[in-house]
Image (cartoon, rainbow, N blue to C red):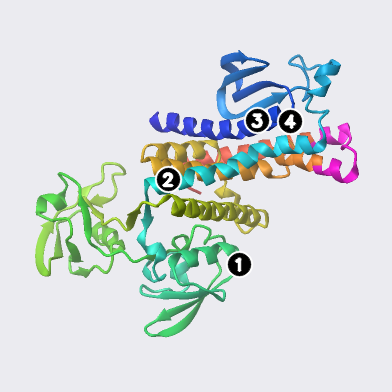
Amino acid sequence: MITIFAGIIMLGILVFVHELGHFAVAKMSGVKVLKFSLGFGPRLLSRQWGETEYLICAIPLGGYVQMLGEGTSEAGEAVELSPEDQARSFANKPVSKRTAIVAAGPLMNLLLPFLVLPIAYMIGVNIPAYLEQVPCIGYVVTDSPGGRSGFESGDCIEAINGDAVATWTDANHALIAHVGSSLEFRVARANHSSVLTMNPEEGGLEGLQSLGLLPRQEAIVGALAPGMPAQAAGMEVGDRIVSIADSPVGSWYDLKHIIQKGGGEPQTFVLDRNGQQLTLSIKPVRDDVNGIDFLVGIAPQPDSIFKRFGIFEAVRAGADRTFELIELTLVFIQKMVSGHVSTKNIGGPITVVQIAGQAAQTDLSSILTVLAFLSIQLGILNLLPIPILDGGHLFFNLYEFVFRRPLSLRSREIAQQIGLLLLISLMILAFYNDIVRIFFGGQ
């Protein structure tokens, strides 16, 4: 319930920012605003201030600003306006002002990250240390695009499709640019260069990890769960695990496979503690959650650096991250339209609430980071040229600006119906994906 409530609050903030953009520019343009609503459906709270009614409604999946001269009355009839009201009607404003009002909502969502991300960076963020290191592979998932392409632990990526990469971040950016394409990796292996090719169906949008190529992570104990076998046997934070049951441990990623292979029987752990070797016998216990895996109660060392930025550095880092998220979102949409990214990746309101709710239970900088990410998604989604969305209205305004006349009412009605059908289809797909993720753990 906490996750759901926190997620709805964060979604409400995004909707409020979006509708505030429409509201503020409408007011500045001299348009009379009749209603400002957070949510749809039956009203829960309402208050009349001046000429505008402010509402909170029961379905927290959006909101709206209703302006004079926009649509019909609540009874579904055309509204007759007095000469004074006609001057303040949205429909009677020049196309430039109508365009500004419509564009203000998505623009506010795209501007919000420029405000909240610098605040997150000034508070302090955990940055994965490997992102700025040479992209050397620490572990290759066997049944993955990387494993099938011949990658080996220790390979260091030098270039992707001819683009030189110096850090893990560079490699991830190069992958985003080539999602859906065949990939050619130049890697350094044992003091010589090799070329490996890969043709993933859609992997790479989430970086090297989505291809089964994981960064180096030593098998050093970073935390011990109280009351679990590892702590009871005498393992300590900082111990490096050398081997388990005579199987050498090269990285943290080896541990799960070796421990599960033991089937819950006692296993001999060889540790390196401050340069000295010691041996412990540890009997794993069955995982209470899934009833299948066996656990010893250890966690790796945090592979991140906590960094707090000064104000100017935070503004620059926040702007860079905002542009990066916008680029990632646009690439995702382009690759999905071209068929290089599956529609299974589309998430709906349930996913949004989950992401927001999980972030809300961490720390303020994580909340602000997720808020910025979701705000960009909402802003770009609303700019898509689909009738009913803000982007559809902007397209109508562009037509009017170019041809010096508005699109015919009949054409607009047909376009709106098509847009509504597309939006409903998209929502059904998103809800379906959400439900499959929840009940079946993916697709």
Percent coordinates x, y for residue 130 in the rendering: 37, 63
Q: Which mark is residue 209?
A: none
Q: Amino acid at mark 1?
A: Ser
- Location of mark 3 (residue): 24
- The reply, left or right, for residue 92 in relation to residue 175 is right
Q: CA distance from mark 4 to mark 2?
A: 34 Å
- Location of mark 2 (residue): 120
- Location of mark 4 (residue): 29
For marks 4 and 2, the one nearer the N-term is 4
Does the magenta portion include 406?
yes
Q: Are marks 4 and 2 in contact (CB under 8 Å)?
A: no
Which of discs 4 and 1 lies nearer the camera? The answer is: 4
Give 158 or 4, whichever is nearer the viewer: 158
On the image, which quarter does residue 273 sit in?
Answer: bottom left
Is residue 296 visible in the rendered image? The answer is no
Q: Amino acid at mark 4?
A: Ser
Q: Are marks 3 and 4 in contact (CB under 8 Å)?
A: no
On the image, which quarter does residue 367 sit in?
Answer: top left
Percent coordinates x, y for residue 324 in the rendering: 54, 56
